[in-house]
Image (tube, rainbow, N blue to C red):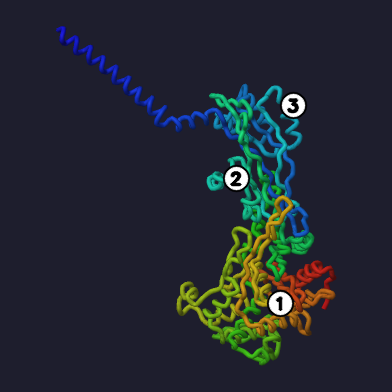
Amino acid sequence: MKSKNFQKEDYFFFSILLIFGILLFFLFKFQIIEGEKFKEIAGKNYFRIAKKTTKRGIIYDKNFQPLVENVPLLAVYIDIGKIKDKEKLAQFLSENLSLSKEKIVKIIYENRFRKFAPILLDSNIGLETAIKLSEMISKFPSILVKAESGRNYILESHFLGYVGKISRKEYNSWKDKGYARTDYIGKVGLEKFYEAELKGKKGYDVIQVDAAGNSFGLMKNSTGKQSIEGKNLVLTIDAELQKLAEKLLPSDKASALVAMNCKTGGIIASASKPKYNPNKFVSGMNQKYWQSIVENKDKPLLDKTYNATYPPGSIFKLLVAAYVLENKLVNPDEELVDCKGGVEYGGRFYGCWKKEGHGKMNLLDAIRESCDTYFYKLAEMINLDDFKKFVDIFGLTEKTGVDIMNERAGFFPTSDWYDKNYSKFGWTRGHLLNLMIGQGEVLVTPLSMACFYSAIANGGILHKPHFVDYFYVDGKKEKIENEKTQIPIKRETLEFLMKSLDAAVNEKRRTGGMARVTNIKVGGKTGSAENYKGDTHAWFSAVAPIDNPEIVVIVFIENGGSGADAAAPLAGKIIAHYFGEEPILLY
């Protein structure tokens, strides 16, 4: 018995030794082997990083007039560490803010451990609300009202875009770049494309806290950083010309206007109708205003200059003329057709826009008077797939690369496309007749046509279109280099095309005379694209001055009717304003 008792005591003794051995092992591991690791973790328990706000960059026009600016706003925060009664606080705030009591309670709960930094509830509360909240701070000391900055859009132009509260998806993409869930971010337009430059970089303070997360204020010898303001953008846009463009476009039709410096690719004006007020997306909008936007058949949110495609009509004829000249398919002086108002082809009549006909036409005549019959004849000589390659050279089927998100590409069919969509025997050369006058399946954006005409006017040099000229930081310019491409096209071809644009505006039997300007010789081309859903679309492309081109203007009016009557006068007014002259409004 004595021996058995000894064995039990011995077993107990060794068990105690084993437990102490294990404790000593982990003590050695945590303090010696992984001591630095846990020292770092412990260090993080007595300080927190509090982010500072930063100012978003301002957007200026070419003359340094602000188009988008920062304005003071009043924001309301709550200090979690100073809440006495969350139910009463939530009830009071819900009565004065556009947040429910349940939402406020949820925010408090989700941030219950964030006692070192105030939590944003509303970024724009208005002066009257701010006064009400400030009067109750003695009763609710957790409420903080701060003056901050918000965005104001002086011009309500599509290309500027707008900022809005960051979405969950955006936050997940941008959180590693210092974004918080309460931040604003560029949603569309330049605000989105240049988000990284406009935003700037937030600074931070290092806050000392206790074990419960209560703040002791800034740490001694804090290594915090100051915020860096966002870069300012200086655009190629002329604010006064932009205002005129938006005024000229009809308010009751979808329409677009692009004015571009053909020597640089800088966009001087870019207007789209109907438009919307971007400030509503920042300050908030009521349901009625939102419904008026989304239910409008003309789609106010869509920028028609670069994000919508249309059949170009007769302004496309200049590209066809360039192709036949480059490939020596016609003698430009030869009277190729005697227009009687259209042609019979494949058992179908293809009409010319002038029902009584134009008579005998050479290539220059056909462009000046926009004779469809002449271009129907050219369709008989043109190989579809070869012509498609020529279209691609000018980039009309691709995105232009403009510094705006969500640009839409144009379209031009190939024989394979027709085979796939119509079957191999379901289409004929008759389809080409429509394509050669800018009808049928061909689609372009107004911006892509501005680029095409700029290349013609600029000796075949195609500059990438752009809105931003340079960044302006601390009084210094940061220039942006933009690409340019030399189009492989003969000088003789370009000279003929410019001569034809001159004739279409300034010679007898012209179609674009309504674009003429006092003391400035304007060249241009009219276009009227048929639309099976309604009236024809009106186009006009203008180049000025014709002897030394500087500006190209494209005007498009959906269901506008005749390009000569509806679009050409607007282009003339834009050019007149640009050069400080007066338009000639009568033939």
Q: What's under tag 1, amino acid-wise?
A: Lys
Q: Is residue 427 above or below residue 257?
A: below
Q: Earlier in the sequence, mark 1 or mark 3?
A: 3
Q: Is residue 88 above or below residue 67?
A: above
Residue 235: tell me if it is visible.
Answer: yes
Q: Residue at x 65, y 63 (%)?
A: 481
Q: Nearer the viewer, residue 385 or 350?
A: 385
Q: Residue at x 49, y 73 (%)?
A: 417
Where disc 3 sits, the SS reads: helix
Question: Mark 1 sits on what residue?
Answer: 525
Q: Looking at the image, do the residues carrying marks 1 and 2 touch, with CB atoms under 8 Å apart?
A: no
Q: Residues within 10 Å of mark 1 (few under 14, many from 20)?
A: many
| Mark 1 vs mark 2, CA separation in Å | 45 Å
Q: Looking at the image, do the residues carrying marks 1 and 3 touch, with CB atoms under 8 Å apart?
A: no
Question: Mark 2 sits on what residue?
Answer: 166
Q: Quadrant of the C terminus?
A: bottom right
Q: What's under tag 3, amino acid-wise?
A: Glu
Task: Indicate which disc residue 135 carries.
Answer: 3
- The number of discs equals 3
| Mark 1 vs mark 3, CA separation in Å | 66 Å
Where disc 1 sits, the SS reads: strand
Q: Is residue 538 left or right of residue 309?
A: right
Q: What's under tag 2, amino acid-wise?
A: Ile
Where disc 2 sits, the SS reads: loop
